[in-house]
Amino acid sequence: MRVKSETILPYSLLVPTLIFVILLIVVPIGQAFLLAFQAPDSSFTFAHFQKMANDTSFGDALRFTFLLLIFIVPMQVVLAIIMALLIHTRFKGHTLFLYIYAIPLAISDLAAGIAWLSIFTERGYLNSILNQLGIFDKPFLFLSYQNLPAMFGTIVVAESWRATAIVMTILLAGLQVIPRDYFEAADVFGATTLKRTLFVVLPLLRPSLQNALIIRTIFAFQTFAVVFALAGRVIPVLAGESYNWYVANRNPNIAAAYAVLVLIFTVAATWFYLHFFQTSAAEAGYD
Amino acid sequence: MPSTLSRRYILGRVSLYGGAILLALWTLAPLYLIALAAFSTRQATFQWPKPFLPTDFSIDTMQFFVNSRGVLDSVRNSIIVALLTIAGSLVLGAPGGYALARFRFRGKEGISLGLLISKMFPTAILSIPLAVTFLQLDLYDSLWGVALVHIAMALPFVIIVTAGIFVGVPRDLEEVAQTLGCNRLQAFLRVVLPLALPGLAAAAIFTFVISWNEVFAATILTLRNRTLPAQVLSGLNDSPLYYRYAGGFFMIVPALIFIFLIRRYLLNLWGNIVR
């Protein structure tokens, strides 16, 4: 009797979750594909994708989404590695700095976009500083369609500021499970801090780095509110187009087509990282 | 020799603290400035160049924001949705986390993989079909609808985080309780749960943050019953700057408090987002 209940218990504990996941994750994803690929007469069609691709914003949305990814992810990783390594030295007061670096974890991309809006807007804080330093007498229009690279730059800065914290925590969690012996061995052989970081710490950090890259790339494909806050619709992105097609144009089919596209990129990026890093399951599992 | 060594040591310390302080300023500066913008007068929004000290501190802008139509309701809605999300995802997820932490069973690997995959799904691919379904089910523009999507988003995290918490509660204690006459449920309620409570509270706060910050689904799924981010986003392009500043600051404040409350659990909660 006892043995039997022990074998059933874990499953019965998981059943509610399973039902919920099927109803609110699996079924909706199936429906998203139906919305994206089904004609009104229920036959299979590429018409929605064609309409999506023929839209004037599509090319820009695709380009800007990937450009943001290319600029933001490396910047976040570099900043986050520096933060994590600094905290990991456990200097006096490091817990205070960890708290400060972690604050953006709990800030939404919308709120982050608005915070940076107060800095980059025409009469904002950056222009105020530049004026007081005597660099510009008139405000520079960072957020104008005439200065597209500047506008793009503001989004890169705001999103890097916000999401570096996530990368930092993932890397710090990874650093903490590296046995101290490795660092000590490196010291015994006379490695400098730089050499130790490059040849001992970073290679051991590879699984965490892979995780951080996967999670950041996935979220970068979904970048949306920070772009709306800083650039309105001047800089379109894929998730933003999905939103617009649903909310402004009342067209769930094309909105779903965009969502499916984002999903495809998400899966492809994950596959790419898993192969690129070639981390075995056992290696990744040591955390 | 000792003097060069100590000089190197001092140089190392200086660059360590210098770098740490620089990065802290980079993190804190936007927070300080948005607070400054939110606590000046509405006219000050258009002042230029702007002062960098709170010389004209005023609650005028914040007052205007809070009294704007729909804002207080949206704050209330956000809190309700977040509480529903916490309750739903813990009730559903914590038993699953316990199962993963305590049992070896067939299909466990598959379930862990499934959890990992379900964390990857873009918000759009869930919200858009659900908006269509909710319209048919009369759940559209309801707080329940938003909460259901937020639970779906939070659930995989909650299962993984709670599994980590339950692994941390020694199994021996539970077995001792059972040999002393508790049944499995009693042992869980009297021994495991109290020990897991701080971790579960942290997981609840983590869930609150996910829900409080979520923009896309909340905006797609509501029309009048907006949550705070949905309210701010939907009026973004036709609201005055000072309204946006106040809204931005208002959304950030709970974040500061919550990160402080769960600072001990930061790495466990966010550090293991993907395993």
Image: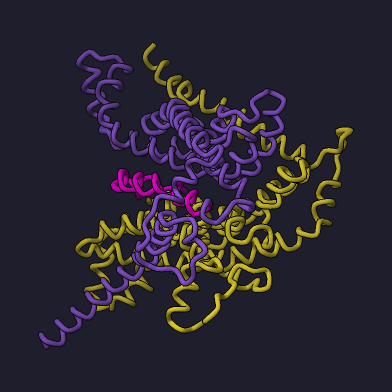
Chain colours: A yellow, B purple
Q: Is residue A135 visible?
A: yes
Determine the residue positioned at 47% across, 51% down.
Answer: B246
Instruction: Answer with left or right where residue B259 lies relative to residue A125.
Output: left
Q: Quadrant of the N terminus of chain A?
A: top left
| Residue B243 screen position, x and y as percent | 52, 51
| Residue A186 screen position, x and y as percent | 27, 72
Q: Eyeballing the image, is A58 above or below B84?
A: below
Q: Is residue B257 magenta?
A: yes
Q: Eyeballing the image, is B93 above or below B31?
A: above
The majority secondary structure of the magenta stretch comes to: helix
| Residue B129 screen position, x and y as percent | 69, 36
Determine the residue positioned at 56% across, 53% down.
Answer: A219
Q: Nearer the viewer, residue A172 or B137?
A: B137
Q: Quadrant of residue B133?
A: top right
Q: Nearer the viewer, residue B1 or A189?
A: B1
Q: Is residue A152 visible?
A: no
Identify the magenta region: B244-273
Determine the residue positioned at 59% across, 63% down.
Answer: A69
Residue that sits furthest to the top in the current view: A1
Determine the residue positioned at 25% across, 24% down.
Answer: B191
Q: Quadrant of residue A250?
A: top right
Q: Eyeballing the image, is A231 above or below B246?
A: below
Disc count in the image?
Answer: 0
Q: Eyeballing the image, is A193 above or below A77?
A: below
Q: Is residue A7 magenta?
A: no
Residue that sits furthest to the left in the current view: B2
| Residue A73 screen position, x and y as percent | 53, 64
Q: Nearer the viewer, residue B261 or A275?
A: B261
Instruction: Answer with left or right where residue A235 lies relative to residue A109.
Output: right
Q: Nearer the viewer, residue B102 or B42?
A: B42
